[in-house]
Image (cartoon, rainbow, N blue to C red):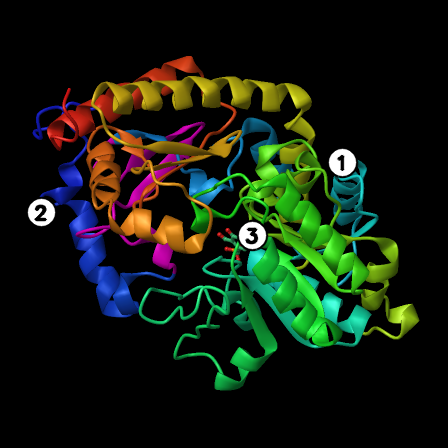
Amino acid sequence: MNQTPHSQTTARYLDESSSSKQLWDRALAVMPGGNSRHTVVMDPYPVYAVKGQGCRVWDVEGDERIDFINNYTSLIHGHSDPKVTAAVTEVIANGTAFSLPTERDIKLAELLIDRVPYAQQLRFANSGSEAVLLALRAARAATGRSKIAKFEGCYHGIYDYAQASDSSRPHNWGDPKRPTTTLEPSMAASLASDVVTMPWNDIEVCRALIEDHASELAGVLFDPLPAALGLLEPRRDFVHFLREITERHGIMLVADEVLSFRVDHAGACTTYGIEPDLLALGKIIGGGFPVGAVAGKADVMAVFDHRDGEKVHHGGTYNGNPVTMVAGYETMAQLTVDSFEHLERLAAELREGMTRALSDRSVAHRVTGRGSLMMVLLTDEELTDFRSVARARAHSPQLAQIAKEMLHHGILLGQRGLFLALSTPMQSGEIEAFLRAFEQSLDALGIGSA
Ligand SMILES: Cc1ncc(COP(=O)(O)O)c(C=O)c1O
């Protein structure tokens, strides 16, 4: 690690004359809020990156950190993986986008379909948001219905129907048995009547809501491991109930695994023993390049088929572009069953170490998630739904403080809480470095009674 004037911390970006501060001033002049992506917001301003290699990133000050968030979970092999870099370099020299199809998207589609038992066909897009949009449009086209049901507080990207209720807060979330479909001021008010908001894990309330709207519901959208719900593992009876009730009413079950596909070789739904009708993918399958994909059973995916009436017109200038396709292929081809075992082993070391550090300090906590995805919540309350997790977060201002302190001890995390995504180049040494920084951060902030 770099030795800095900040007593061996990686906090040079905070100096008034730092390059990060100068970039921030320039960014504020040309972009509202100084960014094009709210997830890069940091207090008081972001650290600006200059380079990434494996599981490490360097900022414009020259400080090095271990990357424990990996572009919000998308870089499962870390930065500039050699095989991805070689494949992309070769493609770039031979044309990056054509008005003709290539073999590249067929290869990645074959690989993914081979892996996910219930996915028979697939189409590519350029972001997870588009993948969710296409899955919901397909659900409407396949059922001839227009309403969508989704879970309170869950983030599924920026398509209006998927983003509704993402802004639910205590002042607007309403009755727990009939949660209000909350909308941002940027959304059409009419959206509220086409989105049914449901509470996670409450079978009785969800049954009543689904049955009330059954004849109008095209799809039920869910993420098997939602970050907004603190990455709590789903109750098996709950996800099986969702499969059973949607099937009974001819409603498409739409799984958003843009984030959670990285938990297992065939993705999260397979782990929990259910087969959705439609699956939205993104992040890791693009190998570090913009990507989205919608997959599903062939009869449902037929709504995209131009030979069959093209019920969903699907354009996209960069869909299936060769650069993303080879990066995704090289990434997924290397992501073997052994890679998952490696990630699981590191994740177990990390979970155990964080649990020990917090227990030794008598800090109430939960380390949640599965496989390479994890979160820390500072509570011992029972967490079941968005509201219980939101309350726990509201009572844990230390989460953001710890994330910021970790930044000063050489560890990069999401700054809104303790949200981590491991990458395959990591070894036990990186986990030990994380745990050292974690203990130092808890001590620096005086958290707990060590
Ligand atoms: C569960 C989930 N769905 C959809 C998206 C949107 O993906 P993208 O940012 O690629 O549009 C995200 C992004 O974080 C996500 O976490």
Quadrant assignment for the N terminus: top left
| Separation of marks 2 and 1 at Cα, in angstroms | 50 Å
Is ligand 1 closer than 8 angstroms to the Cβ of mark 3?
yes
> Residue at the spot x=74%, y=42% of the render?
108
Left or right side of 30 for 7: left
The residue at the point 61 percent across, 47 percent down is: 257
Residue behind mark 2: 17
Q: Nearer the viewer, residue 54 or 197?
A: 197
* Rendered location of residue 200, percent (x, y): 53, 54
Magenta stretch, residue numbers: 37-63
**Which numbered tag is attached to residue 374?**
none
Mark 3 lies on a secondary structure that is loop
Circle 1 packing at 10 Å, graded few (<14), some (14-19), many (20+), is some
> Is 26 displayed left or right of 351 in the figure?
left
Residue 81 visible in this rendered orientation of the protein: yes
Q: Which residue is mark 1?
A: 115
First in sequence, mark 2 or 1: give its number: 2
Amino acid type, residue under disc 1 in the picture: Arg
Q: Position of residue 128 (x, y in %)?
A: 58, 55
Q: Amino acid at mark 2?
A: Ser
